[in-house]
Image (cartoon, grey):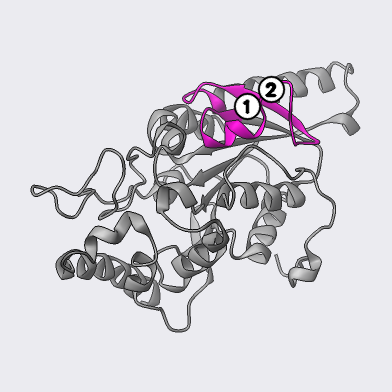
Amino acid sequence: MSITKYRTLKDVPREEFLAPGTSLCAGCGALLVMRLFHKALGGDVVWVNAAGCITLMATFPYTPLKSSWFYTAMASAPAGAQGIRDALDILIRKGKLDPSENLKVAVVTGDGAASDIGLQSTSGAIHRGLDFFYLCVDNEAYGNTGFQASSLSPMGSETATTKPTHLFPAGNPLPKKDLFEIWRSHRPPYVATISPSHAVDLLRKVEKALTLKGPRLFLALCPCPTGWGIEPSESVKLARLAVETGIWPLKEAIYGEVSHTHVPSKRKPVEEYLKAQRRFAHLFRPVKNEEVIAEIQKQVDDYWSKVER
């Protein structure tokens, strides 16, 4: 897309579809992503939510949303989206619903539902070509139940189930699953990574996805003050640091073809990102774990070496 209505932060739509004062934690990165995403989608949306942190945003009979909300079990959001999309299409086809009253169908899930419990139903929905948006708000753990490790928890992080011990001093020993590439292997029309620190990039990607039809998938890194051990005021700073260190590449794939929408001119050391969070504190105290920090840096460097080639 060569022409966009989102050029600077001044172009962020002023209309709000998500009211302030929700029951989510202060500084929640997912809340900011949801707010921006909704601005780009507009108000004619029905959200299908897989159980998780974001569920606490809309608890019956209260909702901060001007749009519709449908709650499902963790594994079932894409199936719920299929039912809603089919129902809308059938009603329009039968003349029982005016096309002007059609709604966009958007799933919102955490990383646990996206990468673990709900991956099967998501794969099925992509395979069927379901016309929907899928937003994964990735705080890199099961935040709603105590911050247990998910398959999107990064190597070296401390979670409730990957405490540093004498056997595993690095905390989580497993690498983060590459959900972007898992989705891309299905060759949907659109896949993108987004960040609450790069609002214009986020809005442009949703704008582009609106011109396409079929599964459109978004993976958002969402700092979690309680789970990451940061101050609520630092969420956007940490999200930006993830991009500037190269840990969180901003990219998109249109029918499988990948391009990066932001390439840091000079990447900051990953250590700056790690040492700012309590969940990585064991890598620096009481003794600095040079080996694990170097391995994390190497993984980032190897990724960008491939990109640059």
Number of marks in the image?
Answer: 2
Task: Check if residue 64 falls in the magenta segment.
Answer: yes
Residue beneath label 2, please? 84
Tell me the residue at 66%/25% (across/down): 59
Q: Is residue 50 above or below residue 166?
A: above
The boundaries of the magenta stretch are 49-77
Which image quadrant for residue 24? Answer: top right
Closest to the observer: 34 or 122? 34
Q: CA distance from mark 1 to mark 2?
A: 5 Å
Residue 63 is situated, as x and y percent measured from the top left of the image, at 74, 30
Q: Are marks 1 and 2 in contact (CB under 8 Å)?
A: yes
Residue 253 is situated, as x and y percent measured from the top left of the image, at 52, 56
Q: Secondary structure at mark 2?
A: helix
Q: Is residue 225 left or right of residue 34?
A: left
Q: Secondary structure at mark 1?
A: helix
Closest to the observer: 264 or 101? 264
Tell me the residue at 64%/35% (across/down): 57
Quadrant the C terminus occupies: bottom left
Q: Is residue 80 above or below residue 278?
A: above
Closest to the observer: 191 or 290? 290
